[in-house]
Image (tube, rainbow, N blue to C red):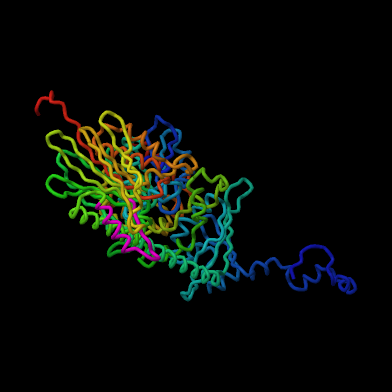
Amino acid sequence: MDIERRNNVTVTGNPRGRTVVLAHGFGCDQNMWRLTVPALADDYRVVLFDYVGSGRSDLSAFSEDRYASLDGYAQDVAEVCEALDLRDAVFVGHSVSAMIGVLAAGMAPERLGALVMVAPSPRYIDDEGYRGGFSAEDIDELLVSLESNYLGWSAAMAPVIMGNADRPELGEELKNSFCATDPDMARVFARTTFLSDSRDDLKAVTVPTLILECTQDVIAPREVGAFVHQTIPGSKLVTLDATGHCPHLSAPEATNEAITDFLARLR
Amino acid sequence: MCRAGQEPGPHDADHDKNDKTPHAAFAALLEDSVEELYENAPCGYLSTLMDGTIAKINTTLLDWLGLEGEAVVGRMRFADLLTVGGKLYHETHFAPLLRMQGEISGVALEIKEVDGGRIPVLVSSVVKHGSSGEPQLIRTTVFDARERRAYEQELLRARKAAEQARKEAEADRTRLQDALAVLQQSLLPSVLAPVPGMEAAAHYRTASPDRLGGDFYDLFPINADRFAFFLGDVCGKGPQAAAVTSLTRYTLRAAAVHDPDPVSALTTLNQVLHERYTGDDPRYCTTIFGTLDPDPTTGQVTVRLASGGHPPALVLRGNGKAEFLPTPGGLLVGVLPAAAFSATTTVLDPGDTLVLYTDGLTEARTSGDRTALYGEEALLEFAAGHAGRPARHVIQAFTGLLDGFGDGLDDDTALLALGVPARTPRTEAPA
C-alpha cells in the first residue's frame, strides 16, 4: 500500500534539518498547521499528513475496527514514519494527536525521539479524582452536533475533498473542505477521541516532552495540563497566553516560539 | 413594505399631494433607527473580541437566552452560550475554520436558555479586519432554527431508516450468496475421483454470485478399471436450472452404473428430462458423457464419448498440436422424446490431455466494445499453445484466459481436463 498517498503525506522545509512531524487533531486536517510550518521550514524538515478518514486521506482505507481505538491512529503515524524511514524525529501532536504520538513513540521508539503535545488530554471524561472537563452525556451531544453539521461534506463532493482529478467540473476549492469529513468516519474519530483514556500510557514516555496548554481551553482545562506534566517524567510545561483549543491558530507566534525554543534545546 | 429605491410607486401621487416623500413615509414606520433595527432584528446579533469575549449583543438574542446585557458583555465568551457538545464542536471545527477562512456560515448549534432550555440555531460569523489587515473582532448572526431543526430531524431519521434498510438488504444478499455458493458446490463433485495413470483438474467460474449457474461436471469410477466423466450446461439459470442440474447429475451417474455406454447414458438422461419437464416448462441441457479405459501396460487411455448438442471436446496432444473431437448430429438432451446421439472414440497417449468446457468460454465477449465472441477458432489456437502440458497446468492457463475476459464473461463456465502424464525420462537419478 502507498502509505504516503493513503495519509496524504506532505514533506516540506529544510531537507537537511531534523524531521518534525506535525499531526492534526480531531476535527480538521493538516491545514491546521498552516501558521506553524513557516516558523519551522528554514531549520527543519517538516512532515504533514492526514489521518485516514480526515482531510484528503484515502477514505477507502478507513476501517471502523482499526480506528475504533487510538492505536489505529498511532499505527497510521508509525506507518508514515516507516514509509519515510524517519529516525529520531520530533512528533508535534495537537489535542488527541498528542496522545496518539505517545502511543506511536511506543510502537516505533527509534523513529520518534521527542514529543510536543499541544493542548493534550489523556482523558476527556471526568473520573474519580480526575477532572477531564466532560461527562459522557456531553460527548453524546457532540456526536449530535457532528450529525447536524456536515460542513459541506456530501457524497457528491467527496471526490473533490479527496482531490480526485476525475471530476474537473467540481474543481474549485470548497469552502470548509479541510474540516469536512465523511460523517460516519468523523463519528468514529469523535468516539475514539473523547471516550479514550490514555492516562496510564503517559508514564511510559521516556523521550524529551514539551506540553503546551492555553490559559482558557474548554477541551483541555489547566488541571489536565498539570496532570500530563506531572505524569510524564521530566516533561516541560508551557502555558501560552492564548484562549481556545487551537493556540497554533489563535496565538501562532507564542506557539511557534515555544516549539522552536524546545527544538533548539534538543540534542 | 421594504421598497428601498427612489422609483415612484403607484401611490406616490397621493404622497405628493400631502407633501410627503417616500422617506418620510418610511420614517413614520420608525425604520430609520439603526439602533432599533439592530436591537430588535428577527435574528440574534453579537460581536466578540478575537478571544470570544462578547463585546456587544442585541436584545433579540438576550431575550432568547433570558439574560441581561450586563451579565454578558465583557463577562461571557460566545462559546459560553452554547451547550457542552456545541462547545466541543465550536473548538474543533467552528473556531479553526473561522480563523482560517475569515468566515463561516450556517453552522447548526444549540444555545442554552437561562432556565435550562435549548434553542437550535444557525450561526454565521465573519472576522472584521483592521486597516492593516489584522483581525479585530468577530461578528456573528444567530438564527432561530427550531422549525428547521425539526424538519432536519425528520430527514435524518429517514436517512437512518434508509441506511438501516440498505444494511439489512446487504446482509440478506450476503446470506443468499452464501447459501447459493453452498448449493452450487453441492452440484459439483467435492473431489475428482483419482484415475490410475491419469491426472484430472477442473475449474468452475460463476458469472454472478447472485445466481445459481447451470453448468456441471463429474468424474467417478464405474468399476476398478473403468471410469466415467461428464460435463454439461443446463439451459437457463437460477433455482429451476439448479434442479435440472441436480437431476441430470444423478441420472447420469445412475445410468452409467447400469450401462456405461455413452450413447445409452445420454438416451436415459434424455428420457428422464423429457418426461420430467414437458408442457409449459420445457428444460433441456447440452452435455458430453464419456468413459475412460486406462491400459496400465501401454499407459494409453481409451476415451469413448457421446455428445448431446454440446461444443466439441478438445484434445491437446503431447506433440504440441490441438484438435477438436467432433461428434456431429448430437441433439440437445431433453427436447425430443427420442433423440439420437453420436459417439466417437480417441486414444490418449502419454502427454495428451482431453479438455471439456462449456460455451461460457467460447461465447465470452471480447474486443474493446465487447461485441465480438471469443469463438472456437481462437480457443483451438490458445489450446495448441498449452498442448503437452499437464492437466492442472492446462486448467491454470484456461483460468487465466477467463480472468482476462473480465466483465466480458456473461455466463458460467465449467472446465474439466483429463490428462495422461508424459513419461518421465528414465535417465534421472533416483531421489
Residue that protrudes farthest toward the bottom in the picture: B115
Residue that protrudes farthest toward the top in the picture: B427
Side of A34 relative to B185 (left or right): right
Residue in the foreground of this view, choosing between B7 and A166: A166
Residue B366 visible in this rendered orientation of the protein? yes
Look at the picture and state if B173 lies above or below B397: below
What is the quadrant of the C terminus of chain B in the image?
Answer: top left
- Report the number of discs: 0
Residue in the foreground of this view, choosing between B391 and A108: B391
Residue at image location 44% in from the left, 42% down from the top:
B373
Q: Position of residue B111 (x, y in %)?
A: 50, 68
Residue at image location 36% in from the left, 46% down from the top:
B329
Residue in the foreground of this view, choosing between B361 and A105: B361
Q: Position of residue B171 (x, y in %)?
A: 35, 62
Residue B111 visible in this rendered orientation of the protein? no
Residue B265 in magenta stretch? yes
Q: Position of residue B196 (x, y in %)?
A: 14, 41
Residue that protrudes farthest toward the right in the picture: B17
Residue in the foreground of this view, choosing between A178 and A210: A178
Q: Position of residue B252 (x, y in %)?
A: 24, 54
The answer to which quarter of the image holds residue B163 is: bottom left
Side of B5 relative to B159 (left or right): right
Residue A108 in magenta stretch? no
Side of A175 relative to B1 (left or right): left
What is the quadrant of the N terminus of chain B in the image?
Answer: bottom right
The answer to which quarter of the image holds residue A89 is: top left
Q: What residue span does the magenta drawing correspond to?
A: B264-286
Residue at image location 48% in from the left, 40% down from the top:
B368
